[in-house]
Amino acid sequence: MRVVATAGHVDHGKSTLVRALTGMEPDRWAEERRRGMTIDLGFAWTTLPGLDEPVAFVDVPGHERFVTQMLAGVGPVPATMFVVAADSGWMPQSTEHLDALDALGVRNGLLVVTRSDLADPELARDEALEHLAESSLGRLPSVCVSGTTGLGLDELKAALVELVGGLPAPDLDADVRLWVDRAFTVRGAGTVVTGTLGAGTVRVGDELALGDRTVVVRGMQALGESIDPVRAVARVALNLRGVGLDEVGRGDALTTPGRWLRSDVVDVRVGPPRGSAAAVDLPQQVMLHVGSAAVAARVRPLSREDAPDDPSGVTRTVRLTLRDALPLRPGDHALLRDPGAHRVLGGVTVLDVRPPSLRRRGAARARAGELATTEGAPDARAELARRRVMRRDELVALGVEVPPDVPAAGGWLVDPGHLPVLARRLVEAVGAHAETEPLDPGLPAKAAARALDLPDPRLLDLVLAEPGAASLAPAGGRVRARDAGGLPDAVRAAVATVREDLADAPFNAPEAHRLAELGLRTRELGAAVTAGELLKVGDGIYLAPDAADAAVARLAVLPSPFTLSEARQALGTTRRVAVPLLEYLAKQGRTRRDAEGRHALR
């Protein structure tokens, strides 16, 4: 189907016009019919001659007190039928509705002058066309009608066919984001929500994300009939399982799971309101309207008000902190409104939904400079170049495909242009560690990742593959220089002395005072063991690296099983060494003990 939203001042005949076109009553509530004005959103539909699909109308309220409802109706809809009464002409809410449509960037529409039986419509039409021409709608076709007498309805139907026929084709494979504009319960079915499906396809049984939870589509209706699937563009009612009526309402969004980022801090570009040559000064508190949502937001300018990032002053870049997180993407269009002053402050283009923090002095202005050339349309390589490192699912949730040649590891992506910088920093970090910790065999992987501001040590493999990191190599969960000299000279000399002492008596481990005399303390001994220059068989017991093999060779000549005393004598050592050495051999699986505590080689 095609969907068109009405717009215009209160009591200018919008609902009467929809009723005349469709034969349906768009005002759903008795209070609306009693007062003769639309208070909430109304819906109706019809089939027009020469059109192979129905047209649905979202009838919005025109009273200034219900502008929020009006914005909820027009926000997700691609075209508008702008209504002006011939006997009243252009009115205040005509201006506010047009300001809203202009801020949202609506470009498809039709001017309808109603009540043409009560006054000459030409004056009202010409005045309205002048206002419309100054907006995103531009020069619109116009039709003069009377909902009461039926005058001009055939011409209006023909104009609507031409309008909807020129609308861009929706993307049926797009990720779903359905802004909820109504929620209610149906006996025997449960919670039902309605909205305008602008892109994508929904099927019965689909799982959709509603905030942090998942709901299931139990059934669907469009134009009063059950249907499966529903394809954009469509007015649709979804019967949901997994959510109560008190847990969903207008302004919520149903989205394809895992494909949207919910953000409560966004960087945006604010354009001037219609008729203004420059961006307005924004109050600190505003309302952000996007889709059917209206969310309070706090404004932080990213450049001084008297020095906007756009030298022409036409636009301004600001950061919005939202009261509630919303599923947004770069390129989304919204508007800012000052509800106290009853005015639209300007249209918004979302630039970044995961902006960096601004902690340093001058960071806000620098950020404005970064965003100055951003147009809002998401681009995978540009997003990655700006963020340098990001999760794959976050890039996908921005609505772009991940290029196949982007370096990736552990679910993370790295900008290829950033890898040479990381390689240089890693070489520097490993060198600095070697200077300050000469006994530590390489920089631990987690410390290396922290030094490079990498969120996952697995990304180090991508850095080590860079030509700039060819001098480095991974080793045992660490990164070290390939030509690392190993032990410092003083430690190497002390270890050599120990090895000389062990040459004639390989199982006479040096005493603690001897090790201390040589300058071999805990760290030095640990480094020697890691380097393979000594073998630690127990606390304070250090032997030559081949001591285990030599011990097995000596014990092999003993009758099996043998006692600790027999082993000690065969090894030519003391109980201080023999006990931990036999325990070491047992842990290595080279000996075993029987029930009487005797030992045997395996």
Image (cartoon, grey):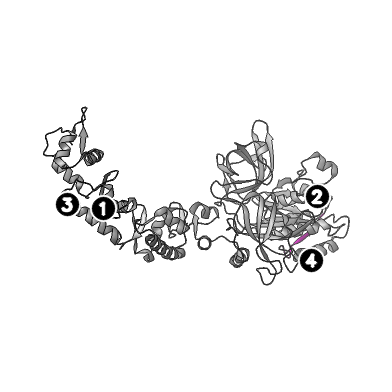
Q: Of label 3 and label 4, which has the lower sequence position?
A: 4
Name the residue that disc number 3 marks.
503
Which numbered disc covers residue 532? 1
Which of the two discs, 3 and 4, sits closer to the camera? Answer: 3
Residue 224 % position (x, y)? 67, 40
Asked whether 141 falls inside the magenta stretch, the response is yes
Residue 531 % position (x, y)? 28, 54
Q: Secondary structure at mark 3?
A: helix
Residue at 17 percent of width and 33 percent of height: 563
Q: Are marks 3 and 4 in contact (CB under 8 Å)?
A: no
Name the residue that disc number 2 marks.
65
Residue at 11 percent of width and 34 percent of height: 559
Left or right placement of residue 479 versus residue 283 in this view: left
Looking at the image, can residue 46 be seen?
Answer: yes
Give, as a three-letter code, the residue at label 4.
Glu
Q: Are marks 2 and 1 in contact (CB under 8 Å)?
A: no
Q: CA distance from mark 3 to mark 4?
A: 104 Å
Q: Which residues are magenta?
A: 137-146
Give, as a three-letter code, the residue at label 3.
Ala
Give, as a three-letter code, the residue at label 1.
Gly
Neighbours of disc 4 within 10 Å: few (<14), some (14-19), many (20+): few
Q: Of label 4 and label 1, which has the lower sequence position?
A: 4
Name the residue that disc number 4 marks.
130
